[in-house]
Amino acid sequence: MLQRVILIVLDSVGVGELPDAYKFGDEGTNTLGHVVEKTGIKLPTMEKLGLGNIIPLKTVAPNPNAIGAYGKMAEKSAGKDTTTGHWEIAGLIVEKPFPTYPEGFPKEIIEEFEKRIGRKVLGNKPASGTEIIKELGEEHIKTGYPIVYTSADSVFQIAAHEEVIPLEELYRMCEIAREILKGDHAVGRVIARPFIGSPGNFVRTANRRDFSLKPFGPTVLDMLKEAGYQVYAVGKIEDIFAGQGITDSVHTGNNDEGITATIEAMDAVKKGIIFTNLVDFDMVYGHRNDVNGYAKALKHFDERLPEIMLRLKEEDLLIITADHGCDPTTPGTDHTREYVPLLVYSPSMKEGRNLGLRRTYADVAATIAEIFNVGPIHTGTSFLRELPLKVGV
């Protein structure tokens, strides 16, 4: 019987536009396809698993002898943000999109926030995180006013220099914003965006923290925890689920740390799930239209993936997927409405298998629920019995 699931989300690694992408202005997007096409990178480990069988990839070949199961999943929820994608992976379908603020936040929200923190704010507009600290960082240092900004996603972001507003104070400001942003203004995430440096040389630090809404219903993580299994969160997973359904967690500063933490968790978790988010694809490269950086990050993951695979036992199941797209080859810098890849592997798999097109990310939650005999998850369809496993199901 399977005893452990290692679930890795390659944040934003989409595999082509969804049929409704036109509603989001995302026609023609294909994060993985375009990155591979533009850079010619090879991803031999994921090719071995069957990555090139999911969609045509210029330098990642289809593999008739794939050792993994492969397919792609459509997002059923209304949105294309991190919270929505992860919640759906865990079994929750978000029917109503989280609010966004293309003109900045309403006057009443900002005034209440300023009143509660005892300071004015700078910004209050959609912006790139790196660009807005270039624009307003010097004024922030002179005044001590935090920089508030948003994006096409449902986020209220607060940027502050760590020597001007200490981290604990910045985090408290985020908690205040989270308390204010309820009801019609319940954004998906409030994000602390600390930075350091001097004008012209500002750099964001790894001390980012996300303050998410609490999930509106039980996820497969809650079900696992309640049943006594370990739910070990790596990266920003704990933040995305506001701590719900998590038994252990470790926050990481980049993809490499996340991969290492996942490997270390494999020594700590005996029965249950390790749930990892690797954020650099999205935060560092996708949102900055850095195609070459995105490619290097994919190559780095592919090179380190064997370290994870070699530690897998017969009773383990590895699932690799994504939460949305963020095509760095497009003119915009926002998330893109795309299918996501699905790669599944266990040492106990007798052969590869085409899992086809899954109608929702929640199929992952349904599969995990069936493995551990929790749930049921009514929002998705388990693919467990489609896997050619030697161990009993």
Image (cartoon, rainbow, N blue to C red):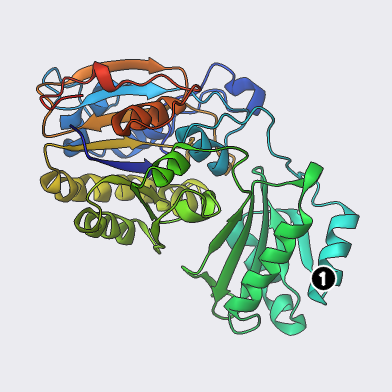
| The N terminus sits in image quarter | top left
| The C terminus sits in image quarter | top left
| Image: 1 above or below 190 | above
Quadrant for residue 137, please give it. Answer: bottom right
Looking at the rendered structure, the number of numbered marks drawn on it comes to: 1
Instruction: Locate residue 1 relative to residue 84 in the image: left or right.
Output: left
Mark 1 Cα shell of 10 Å, populated few (<14), some (14-19), many (≥20): few
Which residue is more in the foreground, 5 or 45?
5
Instruction: Locate residue 256 relative to residue 392 in the image: left or right.
Output: right
Q: Which residue is mark 1?
A: 116
Query: In the rendering, at what x and y percent does residue 230 appear?
Result: 33, 50
Instruction: Locate residue 122 relative to residue 301 in the image: left or right.
Output: right
Residue at point 57%, 70% (across, down): 194
- Is residue 326 visible in the rendered structure shown here? no
Query: In the rendering, at what x and y percent does residue 64 appear?
Result: 14, 17
Which residue is more in the foreground, 99 or 243?
243
Q: Amino acid at mark 1?
A: Arg
Which residue is more in the foreground, 177 or 38?
177
Query: In the rendering, at what x and y percent does residue 290 appear?
Result: 44, 49
Quadrant for residue 5, please give it. Answer: top left
